[in-house]
Image (cartoon, rainbow, N blue to C red):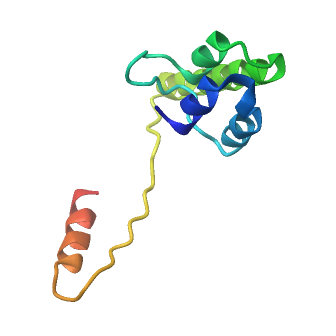
Amino acid sequence: NTPLHLACQNGSQRDDTINMLIRNGVDLLICNRYERARAVDIYKQRSGSPQTRLLLEDETRKQADYSELVKSLGIEEETTVKVFLCGYGQVGKTCLGEAFKKTG
């Protein structure tokens, strides 16, 4: 489960957490491992507040539409990950960094 899935399991008790996650760009299309359900589906089952349910439905639809548009245009979405290599000297940080650069 993602933090959004966990918040949705608690229904309207976590509406502010759900709103904060959505505002910060959480991926609404991810399904959890066991139920294979999106966060919006879990929230609907828990009968949360109508406002948050509508927000979840609307934002999920927007993300799905955008994802479909990107796929139809053949555009590859890029993901950037920043990795900090910390530790003692002579343990392989530089070699690991170089391996990351080679593999992209």
Left/right placement of residue 9 relative to residue 31 reads right
Residue 70 locus on image (x, y percent):
53, 29
| Residue 42 image offset from top left, x and y in percent | 58, 17
Quick one: quadrant of the C terminus?
Answer: bottom left
Number of numbered discs on residues: 0
Considering only vertical position in the picture, is 38 above or below 6?
above
Instruction: In the displayed orientation, state which residue is furthest to the bottom.
Output: 89
**Which residue occupies 66% across, 41% down?**
21
Q: Nearer the viewer, residue 86 or 77?
A: 86
Q: Residue at x 49, y 16 (%)?
A: 37
Is 95 left or right of 73, judged from the image as shown?
Answer: left
Residue at 59 percent across and 24 percent down: it is 9
Q: At which x and y percent is residue 91?
A: 16, 81
Q: Is residue 86 above or below residue 103?
A: below
- Residue located at (20% from left, 66% from top): 99
Kindly indicate the quadrant of the structure image that contains residue 20. Answer: top right
As drawn, 47 above or below 7 = above
Side of 58 relative to 64 (left or right): right
- Residue 50 in which image quadrant: top right
Residue 53 at x, y percent in the picture? 74, 19
31 or 47, nearer to the observer: 47
